[in-house]
Image (cartoon, helix red, strand yellow):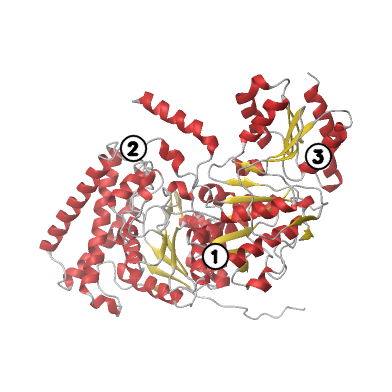
Amino acid sequence: MAKITMVEAINMAHAWEMEHDPSVVVLGEDVGINGGVFRATVGLQQRFGATRVQDTPLAEGLIAGTAIGLAAQGIRPVAEIQFMGFIYPALDQIASHMARLRNRTRGRLTCPLVLRMPHGGGIHAPEHHSESLEALLCHHPGLRVVCPSSPARAYGLLLAAIRDPDPVIFLEPVRLYRFIRQDVEDDGRALPIDSCFVLREGSDVTIVTWGAMTVETLKAAEQIAAEGVSCEVIDVASLAPIDFETILDSVVKTGRLLIVHEAPRNCAVGAEIAATVSEQALYDLLGPIRRVTGYDTVMPLYRLEYDYIPSPARIVDGIRSTLAE
Amino acid sequence: MLMSAHTVAARFEIPYRACLDADGNPIGPLPSFAQDAQLLRDMYRMMVRARAFDAKAVNLQRTGKLGTYPSCLGQEATHVGVGAAMDPEDVLFTVYREIGTKFWRGVDMYRILLYWGGDERGTLYERCPQDFPFCVPIGSQMPQAAGAALAMQIRGERRCALAFVGDGGTSQGAFYEAINFAGARSLPLVCVIVNNRWAISVPVERQTAAQTLAQKAIAAGIPALQIDGNDVLVVRETVGEALERARSGGGPSVIEALTYRIADHTTSDDASRYRTSEEVQEAWAREPVVRLGRYLRARRLWDDAAEETLKRECSDEIEAAVRRYLATPKQSTDAMFDYLMAEPPASLQLQREQARRYAATRG
């Protein structure tokens, strides 16, 4: 078993599924000979040929729309959008068609496909390369939105996404692509989609987060453990639909909830989690739900990006604020 | 004085084709299928059928029995000619007016009424199960058609995707992105631009300064031509050639069919606000159904008795479809949840039950 990075795990999942399911086709900008700008698809065109790994013209709406046509015809497309900041031209295809095709044809036509894209900041990239726009997608019924936080979860969840009978938006946190190496067995085993992962068990505070923010959150939990505060850290992983059962069970146990995400706070996924927990577990809460998030500003250019992305220090303060009452 | 050297980098032209003049007289030699009297009569019957259904649908809307409806009046030759040119194995992507094509491919009138009557079951096409439903966001069907064509190419199939788009639709980026991709990959895609002159209230001259819409395909490296879209013979011939070329690996085509939207944009529109009645009267003089009827009668392929029989058959079929439509109960509220995903998320169970409960209180 090899120790590999998240981007290598993503590549490995592609290769496994292409080897075992001849209907899987990869498409996107620069995914062929170049292997994608992050090398997530490196070597796939050489191994599986240019018919199954297709470079498309530079048009995100076309990539999403082409994937819909392919999927309805029985191909399993795994399409890459180069950066999440470039998702906007594809939104019409995603919202008006991808998310709705099964419903509007009463199940006659379906759209099993994966639309992968790098998510979030932290790698000193240019403007429009660091956005966290998951709320735009989670708002649309009919879509799954998944965001892994480790090489093993990236491998298992991408396999699950490709095998899912419905469209899955797969968000890949850029600063985790090469952050750690982990043993990942190339055994083709998918992880459960629509499920949270408990990354750290604890009894005083529940912290829910996802993607790259799991790293800062686990650091903060470790720091504050020295003060005797026991944090339970949950990686939401599937942002739509959300596994509220796991989150609510944890909140009932700890009585306190902190939500941490990189995206701006306003109308974000964290707001939905806070509202649902308030509706369903208010009397189990010992104090107000708190949020530590990106600011409601434009994602700054990279000199300020780590002032924007919640730091372990901000998260530690957030944990303290949940304990204050 | 220095001057840069000038040569021609590329030169293009857009051919125009027609078979019949506005009175139904042949302009030149006719395609060989014009010898097939049965096909000609079938195309005429389908055009009459589409027009009769269309009139009934408008009437149902006016009497409160159907939702907003977009009439196809005047465009029957383009729609039926395309249907007649396609193979059953091809896949159709429409905008929202092309009932003549859908009827030809076996979609029941009842389904069309259900769709415009506010019921998703109107997209259940039993006889052409791979065809896409109507596409309301303008131009957005085009990349999907390119995707279907790519699937056919990947599998090496002798099939073709056919996509309609309107004159307004050619202003959308999605139109250009799709034909550009189709050209770059030589995809089996035929795009028929239905130039009916009006995108709601905006005439085609205000959409573009291009002399033709067909020439937009030149920028995509695709063969393009313009045809008389009110002449079902040239539609059937030109689209048939393009489909056959695409199925044989010869790549995509773009065909601009010139026609006219005689009706309002939809039943919610009033076209007298933005165009003259003289213009509409002129369009009636070029309309497609009478034209083909004259040609058939001149060839003794049609007569008053045949017309009477056809009208009666259409009327019976339409009345039966309307009766079935009006007798169809609305879906249960569960239908909103049942088709969202293969397995609707557990978190929706409460909402499903709530919808049931309130539906029960509405009686």
Q: Residues within 10 Å of mark 1 (few under 14, many from 20)?
A: some
| Residue at screen point 77% across, 56% down | A183
- Labelled disc at residue B330: 2
Labels 2 and 1 within one chain: no
Label 2 – label 1 distance at C-alpha: 38 Å
Q: Earlier in the sequence, mark 1 or mark 3?
A: 1
The residue identified by callout 3 is A218
Q: Residues within 10 Å of mark 2 (few under 14, many from 20)?
A: few
Label 3 – label 2 distance at C-alpha: 52 Å
Task: Give x and y (percent) for residue A63.
Answer: 59, 59
| Foreground: disc 2 or disc 1 | 1
Q: Does B148 sit left or right of B103 as displayed?
A: right
Which residue in the rendered view is the most extreme toward the right? Answer: A226
Residue type of the residue flagged with mark 3: Leu
Q: Does B142 sit left or right of A301 as displayed?
A: left
Q: Does A77 sit left or right of B281 as displayed?
A: right
Label 1 – label 3 distance at C-alpha: 39 Å
Q: Nearer the viewer, residue A298 or B348?
A: B348
Task: Give x and y (percent) for residue A237.
Answer: 67, 44
Name the image quarter holding the C terminus of chain B.
top left
Task: Give x and y (percent) for residue B9.
Answer: 63, 78
The residue identified by callout 1 is A23
Q: Does B116 sit left or right of B153 as displayed?
A: left
In the displayed structure, A135 sits above or below B283; it is above
**Residue B190 found in image quarter:** bottom left
